[in-house]
Amino acid sequence: MVERQHRGGSEAVALAATVAGLMVCATGCTGSGAAAENPRTATAPVEVLRQASTNLVQAGSSKAHTSMEMATGGTRVTIRGKGVYDYRRQVGRLKVRLPQDPAGADGHRPITELLAPGALYMKNRGAGVPADKWVRVDTATLSDGNLVTGGATDPFAAAELLRGTRKATYVGRTSVAGTPVRHYRGTADLGEAAERASDGNRGALRAAAKGFASADVPFDAYLDEQGRIRKLRHRFSFVNGQQESTVAVASTLLLYDFGAPVDVRLPAAGDIYAGKIAE
């Protein structure tokens, strides 16, 4: 499995296609242009966004919805996930639902993903993996740092990417799922985010900074009154080495029910599949 992760940008596409055809996007609220509402200096949005992941740690945990959409060569693939995340332990559990096949039938049971510092665990992986076994991936070996490959961006990694915010503007007030929020729009640098990130995400974000077509990541972030992320949308791009084309990916994260209980137990060594993964 690890050998296959070192193939660069094309591996992210190949694994995504094998795991699920993985990727997603969600539409959401857009704020009204109310820049005059924010009397602070132009640097304030950058400071607020860089602080957002710290506010999640203070919140402790939450439930999460994820969505990812990949578009290349006229083909669009969408994947959705749902689960919980503990920001203090940096562990989470997502159930990722794969898209239907062209005939409209479900081709695979939902994939269970366990997220941990530096690692992604997948069950119901398919591709020759026994149903009772987990696949473990070292996220620092993935050319996208698992911002894309797993079909769902790790919630805390997504939040820590904002630590690399270089420029941002305050768009205005709006709401997400009935919660009042402030909408910010900006661009983050993957390399800078990696240097500011926690130990658990630093290696993965460094890999992404090298593997994506651009280290600049445009985003829209929606923060509540406590500065916690309620909605976050990133737009990534990487080069498909097999087709020599740029793949556009939109990843959207929704966070809610802060303080929700999280029970995540990582697999024992004997439960991890060590055999060959089918292409």
Image (spheres, grey):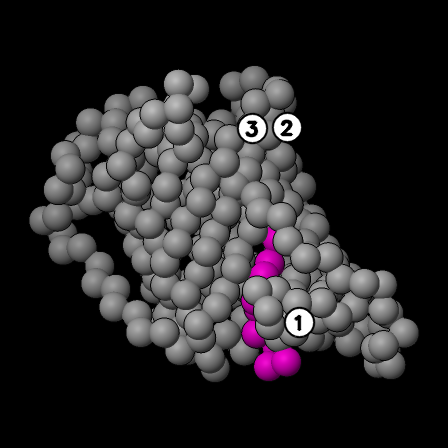
Q: Residues within 10 Å of mark 3 (few under 14, many from 20)?
A: some
Mark 1: amino acid: Val
Viewed as shown, does residue 139 lie left or right of 202?
left
Query: Disc 2 marks which amino acid?
Result: Thr
Q: Which residue is mark 2?
A: 246
Residue range in magenta is 225-233
Residue at x 85%, y 77% (from the top left corner): 37
Identify the residue under disc 3.
76
* Residue 150 percent across, percent down from the top left: 41, 43
Q: Earlier in the sequence, mark 1 or mark 3?
A: 3
On the rendered structure, is 240 left or right of 235? left
Residue furthest out toward the left:
270
Q: CA distance from mark 2 to mark 1?
A: 33 Å
Residue 161 image-quadrant placement: bottom right
Camera-nearest label, 3 or 2: 3
Circle 2/circle 1 CB separation < 8 Å: no
Q: Secondary structure at mark 2?
A: strand
Residue 135 located left or right of residue 59:
left
Q: Nearer the viewer, residue 173 or 5?
A: 173
Q: Secondary structure at mark 1?
A: strand
Q: Is residue 1 visible?
A: yes
Q: Is residue 149 above or below residue 50?
A: above
Residue 181's label in the rendered image is 1
Marks 1 and 3 close (CB-CB < 8 Å): no
Looking at the rendered image, the disc whose residue lies closer to the viewer, 2 or 1, is: 1
Label 1 environment density (alpha carbons within 10 Å; few <14, some 14–19, many ≥20): many
Q: Tag 2 or tag 3, which sits nearer the N-term?
A: 3
Q: Is residue 239 visible?
A: no
Residue 169, placed above or below residue 48: above
